[in-house]
Image (cartoon, rainbow, N blue to C red):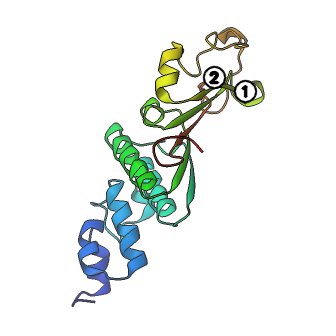
Amino acid sequence: MNGLSIADVFELTIDEAHDHLTDTRLTRLLTTAAQVGLGYVTLGQNLTTLSGGERQRLKLARELTAGAEIIVLYEPTTGLHPIDTGRLVDLLHHLVDGGRTVIVIEHDLDVIAAADHVIDLGPDGGHHGGLVQFTGSVADLARTGTHPGVAGEHPGARPASERRRGGRGRPGRDRFAGVGGRRGGEPE
């Protein structure tokens, strides 16, 4: 392979490998891995040496290269640095611009703020949630004067003292954010 041994290939970073490898499927994965901020990782790096955020970005890159028209991501910002969250949002918008629909279940307010359409579920998590508290654009959400997931701001929300902590220990923060939909930012 261009005069490289297997050992040489394993020493290449994702960014370097992109210049040496020609397989279309592989180069698509390498490009996406670089877009989510993993360009510095070597191909031979043991997965156990990756941080939680790096593993999350690697899984994300794999999902994003699958070619599905509809992509559903569950808390893709888990373990990500804020800079990487910004890269993720840019990548999600790139996918939408390319005609794909992206649905994100997320707690991160930066991701929610970037969504074309927001569905806020609550008023709590688990058995005490799942009711639609709001649906609409981020601008419409901002005009409501409420903050998604804060008890007492939605009809039927119970005081914090009565709520059970669920999921990641952040009660009332269950939300479903869709980044995408049809072109023009309008939800389907």
* Side (left or right) of 47 relative to 27: right
Q: Write the residue at 54% across / 15% down.
A: 144
> Toward which corner of the image does residue 156 lie, by quadrant?
top right
Say which mark, if any, is on residue 152: none
**Disc marking residue 172:** 2
Marks 1/2 in contact by CB < 8 Å: the verdict is: yes
Which quadrant is home to the N terminus?
bottom left
**Sequence-wise first label, 1 or 2:** 1
Tell me which corner region of the image, top left, top right, bottom left or bottom right, holds residue 169: top right
Q: Mark 1 points at which residue?
A: 129
Q: What amino acid type should be assigned to the residue bearing mark 1? A: Gly
Looking at the picture, tell me which residue is in the foreground, 82 or 143: 143
Above or below, comparing residue 32 to residue 118 in the picture: below
Q: Where residue 183 appears, x then y in whole percent?
A: 47, 49
Label 1 packing within 10 angstroms: few (<14), some (14-19), many (20+): some
- Other residues around mark 2 within 10 Å, as few (<14) / some (14–19) / many (≥20): many
Cα–Cα span, label 1 and label 2: 8 Å
Helix, strand or loop under label 2: loop
Percent x, y for residue 21? 30, 80
In-front residue for pair 75/131: 131
Mark 2: amino acid: Gly
| Count of numbered tags | 2
Image vertical order of residue 70 relative to residue 12, above or below = above
